[in-house]
Image: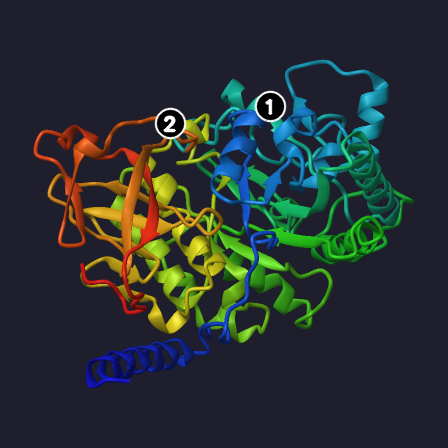
Amino acid sequence: MNKKKLCVASMLLLLFAANLIAFAEGNGPIPPKAPLDYKLDDYRNYFGVWCGGARDSLRYARNMGMRHVIYQSGMEKCPEAAGMKFYYVDPEYITYKRTIDFGKKYTQKDIDEWREVCAMKDASLPFPDCMATGWFWRFNSVKKKSEDPEYNVCSLIPNLQRQKVIDMIVAKIISRVSDLQKRNPNFKFAGFVWDVPQLEGDFWGFDKKGRPRQVGMSFWRGVDSVSVPEGVKLDYPTYCEGRVAFYRQLRAAAKKVNPDVKLIMDPAVIYGHYVKDFVRLGIKPGDPALADFVQLEFGTDDYLKDKKAWESGYLKVENLANAVDYYCYNFEKEIHAVGAAAAVGAWSLWFGNPCPTLPSIRDVPARMKLSRSIATWENLNNTPIEKREWNLDKKEYSSPTAYMSNKLLWAIHPETKKMFFCFTSADGELSIPEGMEIEEIFPLTSIFDEYRKPKVMKNFKIKDGKLSLAENSHYLVGEAFSAKLKKSGPKDKGIPKK
C-alpha cells in the first residue's frame, strides 16, 4: 500500500473510531459489526406508504429495489406483486368495525359488539357516552373545540384486557393473512407494522380548553384500565399489560404462517412512545412483544442521543430507521436525518402518508424520493460503515456509493448498480464514482420508471470525472435521473472528492 492510500485508510479508521466513541458515550448506538452482509430481500427493505394505489406502490417499490410493501387493497391482483412480501398495518383494526359517528343511530347488534369488543371509559353510562374515544378521523385541530361536529367521527380501540377479545382478534388476523396468501401464493406474508405502538393505546380525549390530545385510559379513570360492566372480570390488570399479551400471542400465532414473522413499530418519540412502558413493566430484551425493527416518526437525530432509550437494551442501530415525513420543504433537515442515520448503519424509509399528507408517492419531490432511499441503499450495498462520512456542519453525507448535500445527491441502486441522481442547484457538480464512467442517462418518472430512448445526454456536461448540467439545461434542477455506469480503468475504492 502506498503512502497516500495508507494515509487515507488511517484517516478513515480514526474517523470511525471517533464515531464509535461519540456514539458509545451515554450508551448510544454502536454501528453494526463489519463486514455487512445485507440482501435485497431483507425485511427492513420495504415501502411503507398506505396511499396512492396498490399498483403504483408496487411499481415504485420494485423500481427502488424493495422486496416488501405495506398491504393495500387489491395488491394481490397486481402482476407486480409476484415475488413480493407484505406487512399488515395495525392489524387489530381489520377484525371489527372500528369507526363510529356519534351523530348517527346504530343497531343494537352494533352497539352490543362495540361494548363487548372495545374499550369503555365508563360502562355505567348509556351508549355512546360509555365508549373511550380513539383517533378523531376528520382532523385533530387545536383551533377547534370538542363540541365541533368533526369530532363526532372517531376510532374505537379494542379492549385488550380481556383474553377473549385478544383470542378473537388474533384468530381473525391470522384468518385474513391466510386467505390473502391463498389468493396469491406468490405474494407472501412478512409481518405487521403498528403506526401508534405505545402500550397505553391510541386513545384521544380533550383537555380543559376543549382541544384534542392523545391520552391513556388513566385520563378518564385515574388508572390504566378500561371500565367494564359489574360482574365482568378483566384478565389483565392494566391496558399496557393486555397489549403486551396481545403482541406476544399474535407473534406466536403468526409464526405458524411465517416462522420468520417480523413486528415493526413506528413510535413518534422513541422513549415516550415505545421504550418507557416496556421498561416500567420490566420487559426484558428479546421478549416476543418487542419490535424487531423500530422506525421514528418525529425528529432528526435526537433519538441517536437518547440515553434513556438506549439504556433499555431494546435498541440496535441496525434495527432502527428514520421514517420522518415532514421534510419535504426543509431539505436541510432531511439531509441531516438521513445522513446521520446512514453514517451509523441505520435505515431510512417511507411510512404512512408521504410528506405527511400527500395523496401519493408520485407527489413527493424527486430529491426526497432519492434522499429517503440513501441510508437503506447504503446498507443494501454493504458499504463499510468506516467509509460513510456525515458532516453536520456542512450538512453533507458522502461515501463511495452515495453523496448528499444542498446542491445535489446521488446513490448507487443496490440491485441495478445504476447511479440515481438529482441536482438541487444549477451549479452542482457530481463526482462520478472512481473507476467508472457514464454510458447513458435516463430521466425518471414520478414513480422512478425509466423513460426509454431518452436522448438527454446533451443536457449534461462531463469533464474530468465530473457531471454537471449543461449551460441551457438548468430547468432540470429538481428532476431525477438514472445513469448506466461502466468501468473505465483501475477501480479506486477511496471516497470520491466533492
**Residue 78, position as x, y percentages in the image:** 65, 26
Q: Nearer the viewer, mark 1 or mark 2?
A: 2
**Residue 423, position as x, y percentages in the image:** 22, 41
The numbered dot on residue 451 is: 2
**Residue 470, position as x, y percentages in the image:** 12, 36
Front one among 377 and 31: 377
Secondary structure, mark 2, is loop
Q: How is the image coloured?
A: rainbow
- Badge 1 amino acid: Val
The numbered dot on residue 153 is: 1
Front one among 84 and 175: 84
**Residue 51, position as x, y percentages in the image:** 53, 29
Q: Is residue 223 visible?
A: no
Nearer-N-terminus badge (1/2)? 1
- Quadrant of the image containing the N terminus: bottom left
- Badge 2 amino acid: Tyr
Vertical relation: 476 (above or below) 188? above
Front one among 420 and 483: 483
Question: Would you identify the image quadrant in which residue 345 lies?
Answer: bottom left
Q: Is residue 271 visible?
A: yes
Front one among 166 and 261: 261
Vertical relation: 350 (above or below) 458? below
